[in-house]
């Protein structure tokens, strides 16, 4: 177990982060987040004893980490920092074997137990099949797995990584985060890694460590974090950007022209989200309903700042909600029906669509089966829908075109 007490990290007399109180427990996946230049790397390098603290102490199993010699320290703490170190002509297996140096003698001869540790690390990181490849030939994702394998070969109690997903594609970023989480849980070691992948951190971390404004704050509860003003300020979550506390996804808040086109979307069950985003990106004002408050479309709509007519979960759409949605829909220029799952609770949304047709509102859907209501036009894609709505500049021309 690692503890930081009254820790201050920085360079020279320049304190970057101060008054750090932290405890890393076995089997925990800790993720460090924070804006650029907030001090994440400085903080992690201080924990790894790469740089000395300006104040306070880091303890490892009750012993002051800076009181250990480097060889002993390396048996307990492994670190993977940013960058792609030079590997020369070494194979993957040879690079991973470097992780055994703290355990070998002066000539670094690999005993059977060392070879077994290397083999085990290659298996755990999924690169056993690459053992004979030249390390310099690896992709960025493969190279990062090799560096993690080298660290695991040390058999550490603490694994520290600084931005292990940098320069990786989306698939590799997810794979590395999942690998680190699995390693922490399966090997019962403390893993602490920094990342800019906020949404991945919120979904997969056991504990979030926020570094901002010279401070380090620890959150065991992700819901508490996303509501914290320090988090929102650090990542610029404001009137333009919003992070949903339900889906942990960042949404661009709708910023449409109040005097421009207005579309009412009848959605639910996740069928409306892509429509909301596409219409909003096109500058079209969107309102939606009736959505139950536990529906994913409701969460997305609220995150985007859309005008949303909602109903309590697991209840039938009330007259009040229905009339509010009807009033808002009749003020719109067009209606989109996203073919949500219909049951007894939201059956009145079909009535809304029927009212749209009766009132000569241009109405669109993506599913041909919605043709049971005559007057609803089927479009093949969201792009086609947006194109139809934006076909002319005159706000009223959509409705007029439909009436001709």
Image: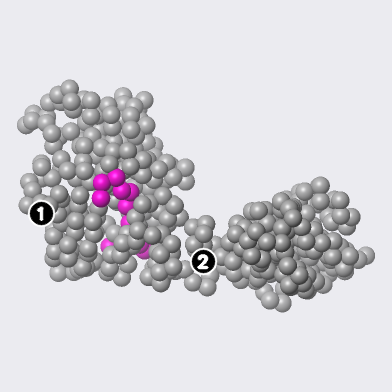
Residue depicted at x 31% and y 70%: 213
Q: Is any atom of residue 239 visible in this view?
A: yes
Residue numbers of the magenta segment:
25-39
Q: Main secondary structure of the magenta part?
A: loop
**Residue drawn 12% across and 26% down?**
109
Q: Which residue is mark 2?
A: 242
Q: Residue furthest right?
A: 404
Coordinates of residue 168 in the picture (x, y in percent): 41, 45
Q: Quadrant of residue 119?
A: top left
Compared to residue 184, the image places residue 354 above or below, namely below
Numbered marks: total: 2
**How far apart in space, not on screen, are marks 2 and 1 (Cα)?**
42 Å
Residue at the spot of label 1 = 64
Indicate whether 282 appears above or below 160.
below
Residue situated furthest top in the rendering: 112
Observer able to see residue 144 = no
x and y, in percent, of residue 395 in the image: 78, 72
Q: Is residue 203 above or below residue 129?
A: below
Q: Is residue 37 magenta?
A: yes
**Which mark is in front, 2 or 1?**
1
Q: Quadrant of residue 37?
A: bottom left
């Amino acid at each position: 177990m690692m503890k930081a007490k009254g820790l201050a990290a920085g360079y020279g007399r320049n304190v970057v982060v101060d008054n750090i109180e932290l405890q890393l427990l076995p089997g925990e996946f800790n993720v460090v987040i924070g804006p650029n230049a907030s001090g994440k790397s400085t903080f992690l390098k201080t924990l790894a004893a790469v740089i000395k603290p300006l104040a306070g102490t880091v303890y490892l199993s009750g012993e002051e980490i800076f009181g250990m010699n480097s060889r002993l320290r390396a048996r307990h703490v492994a670190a993977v920092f940013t960058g792609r170190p030079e590997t020369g002509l070494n194979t993957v297996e040879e690079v991973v074997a470097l992780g055994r140096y703290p355990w070998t003698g002066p000539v670094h001869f690999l005993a059977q137990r060392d070879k077994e540790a290397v083999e085990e690390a290659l298996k755990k990181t999924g690169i056993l099949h690459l053992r004979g490849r030249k390390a310099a030939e690896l992709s960025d994702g493969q190279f990062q797995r090799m560096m993690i394998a080298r660290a695991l070969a040390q058999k550490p109690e603490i694994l520290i990584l600084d931005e292990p997903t940098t320069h990786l594609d989306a698939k590799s970023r997810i794979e590395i985060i999942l690998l680190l989480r699995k390693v922490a849980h399966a090997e019962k070691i403390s893993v602490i890694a920094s990342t800019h992948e906020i949404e991945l951190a919120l979904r997969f971390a056991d504990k979030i460590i926020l570094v901002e404004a010279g401070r380090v704050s620890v959150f065991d509860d992700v819901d508490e974090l996303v509501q914290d003003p320090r988090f929102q300020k650090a990542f610029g979550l404001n009137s333009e950007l919003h992070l949903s506390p339900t889906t942990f996804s960042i949404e661009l808040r709708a910023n449409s022209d109040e005097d421009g086109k207005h579309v009412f979307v009848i959605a639910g069950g996740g069928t409306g989200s892509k429509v909301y985003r596409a219409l909003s990106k096109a500058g079209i004002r969107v309102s939606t309903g009736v959505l139950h408050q536990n529906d994913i479309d409701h969460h997305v709509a609220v995150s985007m700042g859309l005008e949303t007519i909602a109903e309590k979960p697991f209840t039938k759409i009330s007259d009040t909600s229905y009339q509010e949605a009807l009033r808002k829909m009749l003020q719109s220029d067009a209606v989109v029906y996203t073919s949500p799952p219909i049951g007894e609770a939201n059956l009145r949304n079909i009535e809304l669509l029927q009212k749209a047709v009766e009132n000569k509102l241009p109405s669109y859907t993506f599913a041909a089966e919605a043709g049971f209501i005559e007057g609803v036009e089927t479009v093949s894609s969201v792009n086609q829908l947006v194109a139809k709505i934006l076909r002319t500049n005159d706000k009223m021309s959509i409705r007029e075109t439909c009436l001709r």
